[in-house]
Amino acid sequence: MRLTTLCYIEHEGCWLMLNRDKKAVDENKGKWIGVGGHLEEGESPEECVLREIKEETGLNVTNLRLRGIITFILPDWGNELTFLYTAQADSSHVAECAEGTLKWIPVESVAALPLWEGDRVFLPLLQTRQDCFSLKLIYASGGALSGAVLDAERTV
């Protein structure tokens, strides 16, 4: 199982979103996601997410908070355990990103973007819950969401 991080960075009512539009082969191609990546040998999730934020955006962030742990069941790509964070940015200026195009999107407009179906399950939780949640997202071959289990209770 791959170990990854994902962070939604907020600044002045917007989230920094990454449109995965630069790599020829990318399981996230055409989707808008937060910033993050794979843990390297010996890294904690916090070290990983801070490294990835700096590499992909150039930003320094504050108020980094673990908000959830997501288990992705992905028959096409392999399973993944993701540590989900939120953070605050002091500036809206971001560096050029090799992974895709970065853009500040008003939080209320994020749902209109091309997102993974599972992101539509957990993104509202970042706005409505203060505790750390556990979410299992089950995808069918081809990428359709076939189930979701939030805090051990099946929701989809």
Image (cartoon, grey):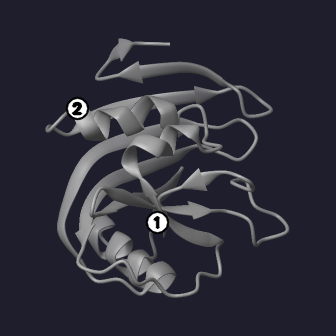
Please name the residue shown 55% across and 71% down the image.
102
Among the 4 quarters of the image, the one containing residue 97: bottom right
Please name the residue shown 78% across and 30% down the image.
141
Residue 85 visible at all: yes
Q: Which mark is residue 36?
A: 1
Question: Where does label 2 land, which residue?
Answer: 128
Please name the residue shown 49% across and 32% down the image.
120
Name the foreground residue: 92 vs 46: 92
Q: CA distance from mark 1 to mark 2?
A: 22 Å
What secondary structure is marked by label 1?
Answer: strand
Name the foreground residue: 82 vs 102: 102
On the image, the x and y values in percent for residue 149 come to: 41, 20
Which kind of residue does numbered mark 2 sit on?
Thr
What crowding class fits label 1: few (fewer than 14 Cα within 10 Å), some (14-19), or many (20 or more)? many
On the image, the x and y values in percent for residue 146 come to: 63, 19
What secondary structure is marked by label 2?
Answer: helix
Which kind of residue does numbered mark 1 sit on?
Gly
Give the number of marks.
2
Please name the residue shown 51% across and 30% down the image.
137
Is 112 placed left or right of 25 in the picture? left
